[in-house]
Amino acid sequence: MSRLNTKILIFLLTFSLLSCKDNKEKRKEIVTEKIEQFSEKETEWNNLTNRILENQYVNSNLGKRIYPIDLEQSLSTELIENGIKFITVLNDSECKEVEYATEWTEYPIGTLYLTWTTCGNLKQTEKGFYQSDSSFIEIFGIGNNWLIWTDSDFI
């Protein structure tokens, strides 16, 4: 019986590893499609981001999750129409960032975040940049201070 358990375990591990590779390729395809859709509306996203950075409620809640329903009607409606669950904002003279947690995807992505940033490693925002530090987090540079990162951790 122990041999059978070992064989089953090896089969399951092999199957899991192969399916993770397939999921990674599916994630890349989905994100590439989302980047194309974003690029068509980049000007609108830039305008939305500027309005968020100037919003009094946002600036009194920096670093916290801000849900669309917390904001004035026009911002709230625009965020909801764009499939945004919540935003997180940093806004000071050295670092400005608006991170949009989207509802754009399902498995195998988990959560997809659209981020505009002037903080940290700006190489990550360069068009065509790609990084995968683990099997769960992937970063895709869009250009013009924009990036998409995915969190595929099922927890």
Image (cartoon, rainbow, N blue to C red):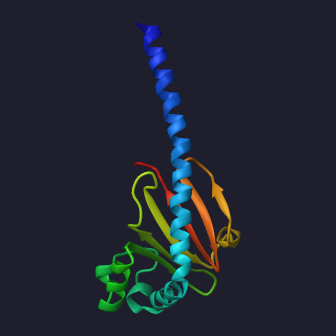
- Residue in view at x 32 percent, y 85 percent: 77
State left or right for residue 28 relative to residue 70.
Answer: right
Give the quarter of the image for residue 106. Answer: bottom left
Give the quarter of the image for residue 143. Answer: bottom right
Position of residue 119 measured from the top left corner of the image (x, y, whole percent): 63, 75
Check the image and report above or below for 34 versus 42: above
- Residue in view at x 48 percent, y 67 percent: 113
Position of residue 29 measured from the top left corner of the image (x, y, whole percent): 54, 58
- Front residue of 53 and 109: 109
Q: Residue furthest right?
A: 123
* Quarter of the figure that contains the N terminus: top left
Give the quarter of the image for residue 124. Answer: bottom right
| Mark count | 0
Check the image and report above or below for 154 versus 68: above
Position of residue 45 measured from the top left corner of the image (x, y, whole percent): 50, 84
- Front residue of 46 and 60: 46
Position of residue 118 measured from the top left corner of the image (x, y, whole percent): 63, 79
- Residue in view at x 41 percent, y 92 percent: 56
State left or right for residue 107 relative to residue 21.
Answer: left
